[in-house]
Image: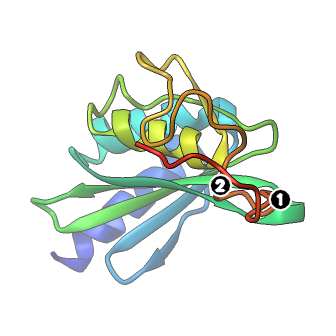
Amino acid sequence: MTALALADATARVRQDLGLEPSVDGETISVTVPPDRWQDLGRFVRVTLGCRFFNFLTAIDWKEQGREVICRADNLDARFSVLMRVRVPDDRCPTLTGLWRGADWMEREAYDMFGISFEGHPDHRRILLGEDWEGYPLRKDYAVDTPHTPYR
């Protein structure tokens, strides 16, 4: 990847979205509030050409709340965009309308962290049984609670 392509993509984020991205190697990192999540995803896919949906995950920062992180790559220009959103109320718009690959990853984030993805076409647990109580990757989850094996 040429430095110019990365610089151009970074400049477009600044100019078109009014955001201040950070750059680490060939990765542009952008943080937005939940109400701009889908707009950022659309911009990353359409304007920046990041058609490959690499991953989506979540982090529980305990007192600071939970965060959803996903990465999309422009394989032709060889750069990626790391998108981040804090979800204080554990609700986030879905990205499944932009990337079909977000489907199972959003379901996993729901299953493990309890983050609801609004507008998701099949919003149910993917790993644990429907009767499972709690969200195992949250910091407040009681790890010593006995449970039946998951599927």
Is 114 drawn above or below residue 59 in the view shown? above
- What residue would you read off at disc 2? 136
Location of the C terminus (image quadrant): top left
Residue 94 in the image, given as x and y percentages of width and height: 49, 28
Is 137 drawn above or below residue 148 in the view shown? below
Q: Is residue 23 left or right of residue 5?
A: right
Q: Residue at x 36, y 44 (%)?
A: 44
Residue extending furthest toward the left: 76
Disc 1 residue crowd, few under 14, some 14–19, many 20+, Cα 10 Å:
few
Disc 2 residue crowd, few under 14, some 14–19, many 20+, Cα 10 Å:
some
Return the mark for residue 140: 1
Residue 132 in the image, given as x and y percentages of width and height: 63, 37
Alpha carbons under labels 1 and 2: distance apart: 9 Å
Comparing 51 with 144, the one in front is 144
Give yes or no for contact between labels 1 and 2 (Cβ–Cβ under 8 Å).
Answer: no
Comparing 2 with 25, the one in front is 25
Comparing 21 with 38, the one in front is 38
Location of the N terminus (image quadrant): bottom left
Return the mark for residue 57: none
**Which secondary structure, mark 2?**
loop
Residue 149 in the image, given as x and y percentages of width and height: 50, 49
